[in-house]
Image (spheres, rainbow, N blue to C red):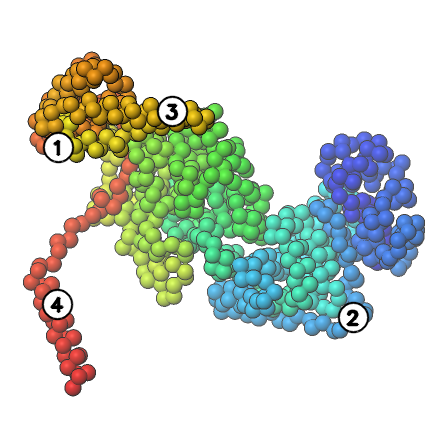
Amino acid sequence: MPRPTKRSALRTLAKPRLAKLVEQFAIEISPRSAGAKLIDALARARKLSLAELLDQLSRDELKQICRAHLLDDSGQAKAPILARILAAAEPTPASAAKQPKPLAPAKPVIAKPPLMPTVSPTPAPVADPQPRQFKSFSEIAGFIWSVADLLRGDFKAHEYGQVILPFTVLRRLDMILAPTREAVWKADKQYADKPETTRHRMLLRASGGVGFYNVSQFDFERLTAPGPHADNFIAYINGFSNNVRDILEHFRFTDQIERLDKNDLLLLVAQKFAGVDLHPDQVSNAGMGSIFEELIRKFAEQSNETAGEHFTPREVIRFMVELLYVEDEQQLGTPQVIRTLYDPACGTGGMLSVAEEHLLERNPDAQLRVYGQELNPESYAICRADMLIKGDDAEHIKLGNSFSEDGHAKLQVDYLLSNPPFGVDWTKAADAVRAEHESLGERGRFGPGLPRKNDGSLLFLLHMLSKMKPPEQGGSRLAIVFNGSPLFTGAAESGESEIRRHLLEHDLLEAIVALPDQMFFNTGINTYIWVVTNRKPAARRGKVQLINGVNYFQKMRKSLGDKRKELGPQHIEQLTGLFRAFEDGPDVKIFANEDFGFRRITVERPLQLDFQASPERLARLEDERAWQGLASSKKKDKAAARAEIASGKALQAQIRAVLGGLDAAQVFMDRRSFVAAVKAQAKANGLVIAPAVMKAILSALSEHNDAAQVCRDKKGEIEADTNLRDYENVPLTEDIEAYMAREVLPHVPDAWVDHGKTKVGYEIPFTRHFYEYVPPRALGVIEAEILALEDEIRGMLDGVLS
């Protein structure tokens, strides 16, 4: 039984309570300090004894201390509970064996029962000491997912992953810690009364340098032994170091344990996981990544979520990494080389892991420091667990929206890699993004422009550009996966066009590679890898390489969701070779940056109208808004409104009489002549027509007529006919007047360009550049096929009727 000490009692208290005790006993430390420092200061304070500390605590807090030290916590009175703790605090041989405690738990420690309870109502089965062996990662994933059979009925289908994913992480961590478990328990006893920082450091050393530990005397075999399983699991979780508890908290794992226990499922699920060997000797880190990806895909299918938001096919990542590293092969082969990489939508960390593995394959002495941010809590937790297991710094992985909560605000790296969700809506971050765009402009991340809210793909690209090192510091390279939308969405001077303009005018876009369709788990659409850099080689400056890789694939033997194709090693090598060669060919086109720019010109034609007061045209006057407004009223007083409406109708009748006085057969070919005739007729009737009503009359009684006189404004300028207005996209490399003379004026000689409305835009019509015309089949061939089909059908009918 663990002996209560002042330090162990303080560890059961939450930080706000510790801060109040610091103020109450005037301890020389800021109440805002970290919880571990508050515990250490209070434990060292000579003026505060254990008895004085306990006397200040409530009954519930004392009961909490009892449970943490495996003492009886029964009773309603405070005094007997306090006496029970003080009695247990006396050093006796029986109390020398100490139950390990969690490191500064984020919430009160739940009772840790004895390691092997001597009494149990019913003997619980013990886990198989020899975990089952599997032939493939998919087989392991299938076995783990079979836990869903146990959950069915008590959990909804979309909730299966909330149990299965954290248990998978926990089992992996449990097996990693197995070889050093005894050493950690010994170290926990030895350094129990040392400052928290010292204790933490020594426990990490005892764990063999894996970066985390567990001080509870539980593992999966003991967790499935007879006993209060929920309490044991909670004690096990609280025994982990802070970095692991952060991971499990984002899975909301404690809630799942309580729910499993309530439905008598906790032991069954734990036994299931105890039966699978996830030790690194059996399952590599890459293998665990594949298992997690398969589990998440199944989870997403059950949840009707988008699996592709969480991970990217491994062979696609390898190809992207090849494109990043291909121009740096010499530098990356240098002994002890250190590089950095960032993914703003890192999901479960697949891209980070593959990039690291790929670099180590090239150079075992190299080091890649990876950084990431993820919005989904479960994916974030898996990514941090993966980093922890591999010995990487898990603190480099941040939780939150990369747009509004940049977890790496000042970070600049050598490489950037990402597959952001296709068509992601960024409305939730809109206020923060717009504020930065308007206040910081080009000094911020989003200065070049903002895309439409229903597709934030290009926002991820802008965010990544802000993480690139300046060229004078070596620059950076970036690879990102998009669907087709960022290539051409948005008119000239729209947010999307302005972002493309920024990339091309600053010579940042190096290449775009079209991938085959059906490459991703959640969509069969065509996708593209954009390669962006601020350190282009001399031969590539001012140019963009387009690579058509749609035919470089092999069919999968078994589909995974929408994924039916994959890149084989030979395809990655071939496509990388095309990139490296940088030569035009059937699947490669090289363009100058300005080839993707255009000027959107407004082509106007003169307004030419004839006018006639015919019955048909007069009838159209009733549809004009200004005319209808004459016989309406906005007055609230009903009598006044009726009077105003009546007056308006009388005015309408007078105007009809004026227009009826004109010759219905006469067609006016000049607007000024018609206006003069209307005004003269109105004057003869003692009437003045308001400008708005005159405009309605002109609109209703006019029609386009190429033989009519051109309409001019008060300054004598030709008026444009908005119904005949047209737009043309003129390449930046071509003169506008030359374009007009060749493409427009031969067809409409009276057209002109309104240069005040000209806009500059950029788009990348990838498909157009690789389009190959296929002539339709000859009519004779089609006719022959139809006749053959008719003969075949006729034969089948004869067989049925005979």
Q: CA distance from mark 2 to mark 4?
A: 81 Å
Q: Earlier in the sequence, mark 2 or mark 1?
A: 2
The amino acid type, in three-letter code, at marker 1 is Glu
- Graded by Cα atoms within 10 Å as few (under 14), some (14 to 19) or many (20 or more), the crowding at tag 1 reads few
Q: Percent position (x, y) of residue 702?
A: 17, 28
Please, what secondary structure does the residue beneath circle 2 have? loop
- Asked if the residues shown at circle 2 and circle 1 are in contact, with their CB atoms under 8 angstroms apart, the answer is no
Q: Is residue 471 above or below residue 556?
A: above
- Residue bearing the label numbered 1: 743
Who's the residue at 50% across and 33% down the image?
431
Quadrant in which the C terminus is drawn:
bottom left
Q: Earlier in the sequence, mark 2 or mark 3?
A: 2
Q: How many marks?
A: 4
According to the image, label 2 marks what residue?
A: 120
Q: Quadrant of residue 415?
A: top left
Q: Is residue 531 visible?
A: yes
Please state which of the two labelled residues, at mark 2 or mark 3, is closer to the viewer.
3
In the picture, the disc for residue 643 is 3
Depicted 545 relative to depicted 700: above or below: below
Cα distance between the residues tagged 2 and 1? 92 Å
The amino acid marked with disc number 3 is Ala
Q: Tell me whether the residue at label 3 lies in contact with that at label 4, contact meaning CB atoms closer than 8 angstroms.
A: no
